[in-house]
């Protein structure tokens, strides 16, 4: 009851005209920067911090949250239409969304993305309001061994699910993990795999790899097939809106994606990448039309996009209740709080209830604004596919380059972008999945840090991973997920031999 009253008071703050304007500006900016590859919400919030120094604290933080929500959604637009994810969290969406767009079903893909984002964002924001204290109690009990086991589950499910060959998926994954080793070892301070290049001391940027593999790699692959085996892109086929069958196939993935995104996003080592790929692999296993996966299954868009936006609300749980940022954007938002002399944590709810509950209430409003802004734009976005292919992919290369330069204006970074782009082309050419490589780069350093922490606590005893029930269960699930594809392949060969 107290939470309901506090939330209603929050709406009285969030519905003030000035706060609504801040929210609208944040949602619009977030959507705009989410569309641009490599320029994410974290960079936008960081650029706006000095500008908002003398503005209203509550309004500024509401705007930052709107940018975060808008950026999570905006990244799906180019992921679906151009196979160029604006954010790493949109990688899973690109896998099926881009295939739907090329088949003339970009409208339904964007629609299920927008509505799924709204559904997941609303449910997750309710969870933020009512379940945050309980989730924090669970999250605090997670040890390093449990986080490491969770990363292993993500590694195995992603590498075993993508592509026709689990072995090729694992190869792609290990390439990504190897890239994650580049840079300064945080424990010893030693440089690893930098080959004397100072620009590599900070490691490989996730956005550079993602944009290189997906956007540049796609452009090179399409160019290579232009005269040999041209790929026909159909801008629009059928309705721009979702059919009854699309609704029927989307509602369950929306709910399952939310169930993945919010709790994992609320973990202090969560983030959006793990739940989006877990959602994708789950939908691939549960889909009644498995033959459509890899060719444009709407479930592969609905589930990951819901998980993506639910995790954004989940990320705010440790930020507001523990003062613990678990993403780059959350870290910049923490700086925004501190800019106004506010320290997120349990005391913030008691000291500044109007600000906290106004922020939570504004997230509901931001979700509504996102749907109102983006649904009418679907017809305009889909028309992008009518642009002649040489112009379209030349534009993709320009925006990919601009996004990379905006993050890090370095010739080495630009060189890596096109090296990764050529690698992405080769992986497509020889049928290696590219998504596990990005997952390896994102989660590899996190898994390494958690494993080292676990071994330090246990004085080097690896059995600590099996002695704790949560980590032991997760590792058992990972082992089953790893062995199952090979076992099924062997069983199918045995049945074929018998026949």
Image (cartoon, rainbow, N blue to C red):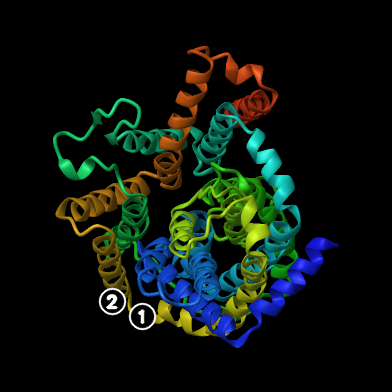
* 309 in relation to 446, above or below: below
Quadrant in which the C terminus appears = top right
Relative depth, front residue between 6 and 186: 6
Relative depth, front residue between 308 and 112: 308
Which residue is found at the position 32% from the left and 38% from the top?
179
Q: Residues within 10 Å of mark 2 (few under 14, many from 20)?
A: few
* 26 in relation to 464, above or below: below
User: Which mark is on residue 387?
Assistant: 1
User: Which mark is on residue 124?
Assistant: none
Task: Specify whether 60 is left or right of 366.
Answer: left
Spot the residue most to the bottom.
Answer: 17
Quadrant in which the N terminus appears = bottom right
Task: Specify whether 471 is left or right of 435.
Answer: right
Q: Residues within 10 Å of mark 1 (few under 14, many from 20)?
A: few
Q: How far from the left and from the top, in percent, is residue 190?
A: 25, 28
Q: How far from the left and from the top, in percent, is residue 73?
A: 53, 68
Q: Is residue 289 visible?
A: no
Spot the residue most to the right.
Answer: 1
Mark 1 element type: loop
Q: Is residue 400 visible?
A: yes
Q: What is the number of callouts on the image?
A: 2
Q: How far from the left and from the top, in percent, is residue 390?
A: 27, 73
Alpha carbon distance from label 1 to label 2:
7 Å
Mark 2 element type: helix
Residue identifier under label 2: 391
Determine whether label 1 and label 2 are within 8 Å by CB.
Answer: yes
Q: How far from the left and from the top, in percent, is residue 98?
A: 48, 64
Relative depth, front residue between 499 and 191: 191
């Amino acid at each position: 009851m107290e939470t309901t009253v506090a939330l209603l008071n929050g709406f009285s703050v969030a519905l003030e005209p000035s706060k609504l304007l801040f929210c609208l500006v944040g949602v619009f900016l977030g959507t705009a920067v989410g569309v641009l590859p490599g320029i994410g919400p974290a960079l936008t919030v960081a650029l706006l911090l000095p500008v908002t120094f003398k503005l209203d604290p509550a309004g500024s933080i509401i705007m930052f949250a709107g940018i975060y929500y808008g950026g999570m959604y905006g990244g799906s637009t180019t992921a679906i239409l151009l196979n160029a994810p604006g954010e790493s969290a949109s990688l899973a969406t690109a896998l099926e969304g881009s295939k739907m767009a090329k088949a003339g079903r970009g409208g339904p893909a964007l629609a299920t993305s927008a509505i799924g984002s709204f559904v997941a964002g609303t449910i997750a924001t309710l969870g933020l309001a009512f379940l945050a204290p309980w989730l924090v109690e669970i999250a605090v009990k997670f040890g390093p061994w449990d986080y490491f086991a969770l990363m292993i589950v993500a590694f195995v499910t992603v590498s075993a699910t993508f592509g026709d060959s689990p072995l090729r998926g694992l190869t792609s994954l290990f390439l990504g993990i190897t890239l994650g080793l580049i840079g300064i070892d945080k424990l010893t301070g030693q440089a690893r795999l930098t080959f004397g290049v100072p620009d590599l001391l900070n490691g490989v940027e996730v956005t550079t790899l993602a944009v290189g593999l997906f956007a540049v790699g796609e452009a090179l692959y399409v160019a290579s097939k232009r005269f040999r085996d041209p790929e026909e892109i159909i801008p629009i086929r059928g309705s721009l809106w979702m059919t009854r069958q699309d609704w029927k196939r989307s509602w369950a993935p929306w709910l399952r994606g939310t169930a993945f995104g919010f709790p994992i996003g609320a973990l202090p080592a969560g983030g959006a990448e793990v739940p989006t790929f877990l959602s994708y692999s789950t939908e691939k296993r549960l889909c009644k039309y498995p033959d459509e996966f890899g060719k444009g299954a709407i479930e592969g868009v609905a589930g990951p996009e819901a998980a993506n936006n639910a995790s954004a609300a989940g990320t705010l749980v440790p930020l507001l209740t523990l003062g613990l940022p678990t993403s780059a954007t959350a870290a910049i938002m923490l700086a925004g709080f501190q800019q106004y002399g506010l320290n997120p944590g349990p005391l913030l709810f008691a000291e500044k209830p109007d600000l906290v509950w106004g922020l939570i209430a504004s997230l509901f409003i931001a979700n509504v604004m996102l749907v109102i802004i983006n649904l009418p734009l679907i017809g305009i976005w889909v028309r992008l596919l009518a642009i002649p292919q040489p112009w379209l992919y030349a534009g993709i290369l320009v925006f990919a380059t601009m996004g990379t330069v905006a993050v890090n204006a370095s010739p080495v970074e630009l060189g890596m972008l096109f090296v990764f782009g050529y690698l992405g082309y080769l992986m497509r050419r020889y049928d290696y999945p590219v998504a596990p490589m990005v997952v390896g780069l994102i989660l590899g350093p996190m898994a390494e840090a958690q494993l080292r922490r676990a071994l330090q606590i246990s004085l080097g005893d690896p059995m600590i991973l099996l002695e704790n029930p949560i980590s032991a269960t997760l590792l058992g699930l990972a082992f089953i997920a790893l062995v199952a594809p090979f076992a099924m392949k062997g069983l199918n060969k045995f049945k074929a031999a018998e026949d």
